[in-house]
Image (spheres, helix red, strand yellow):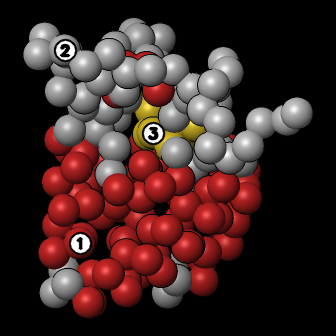
Amino acid sequence: MGSTLTDFSGPRFHPVPVSPHAPTDYLAGHLFPVDDPGMPLVAPGARFSALLLDLALAVVTLGAGWLIWSLVTWRTGQTPAKRLLGHTVADATTGEPLGWGRMALRELVVGALLGSVLGLATATVYLLADAAMTFSPGHRTLHDHLAGSVVRYR
């Protein structure tokens, strides 16, 4: 008989060892090679710079130019600012750049829509918490976790 939703056996699920000596973020090194010198992750300050540059580009182009440029750059896992700064949004498990569909989901649904709604509902506490998460191992924000992504250099 086939697996059920409650059947957690098989190669996809691995037990996490619980030990007082285990790192606090056990999964950070296993979901993506955080310490892999071939895939350096973008530091929080550089991610903030990309956010500010995206906002500036959106203002200067009255939003339309930024949106059109975004629609083009999303196919390579980038926003306009990430393209200029050499950053790529990649899958957290494989390290491959996200495609157009996942970038649209990450940027429009998770980043903009969810961020706006939760930011307004919590008096911007969500936005501050999301930004502060870049200082955690792997430099991943909440919307990175929800989209299964990391931001790395090309």
In this rendering, position of residue 20 left or right of residue 126: left
Out of 41 and 54, give the one closest to the viewer: 41
Residue 49 is left or right of residue 112, and the answer is: left
Separation of disc 2 and disc 1 at Cα? 31 Å
- Going 41% across and 65% down the picture, which residue do you hit? 54
Q: Which residue is label 2 attached to?
A: 19
Q: How many other residues sit within 10 Å of disc 3, few (<14), some (14-19) or many (≥20)?
A: many
Calculate the distance from the C-alpha at mark 2 to the C-alpha at mark 3: 27 Å
User: Circle 1 is placed at which residue position?
Assistant: 126
**Sooner in the amino-acid sequence: mark 1 or mark 3:** 1
Could you tell me which residue is drawn at 34 percent across and 43 percent down?
140
Q: Is residue 113 positioned above or below 16 on the image?
A: below
Disc 3 marks a residue whose amino acid type is: Val
Residue 21 in picture, x, y percent from top left: 13, 11
Q: Quadrant of the N terminus?
A: top right
Left or right of 129 on screen, residue 11: right
Marked residue nearer the N-terminal end (2 or 1): 2
Q: Is residue 123 above or below residue 98?
A: below
Q: In the rendered view, would you say 73 is above or below 135?
A: below
Which of the marked residues, 2 or 3, is nearer the chain's N terminus? 2
Q: Mark 3 and mark 2 in contact (Cβ < 8 Å)?
A: no
Residue 145 rendering spot, x and y as whole percentages: 42, 49
Residue type of the residue flagged with mark 2: Ser
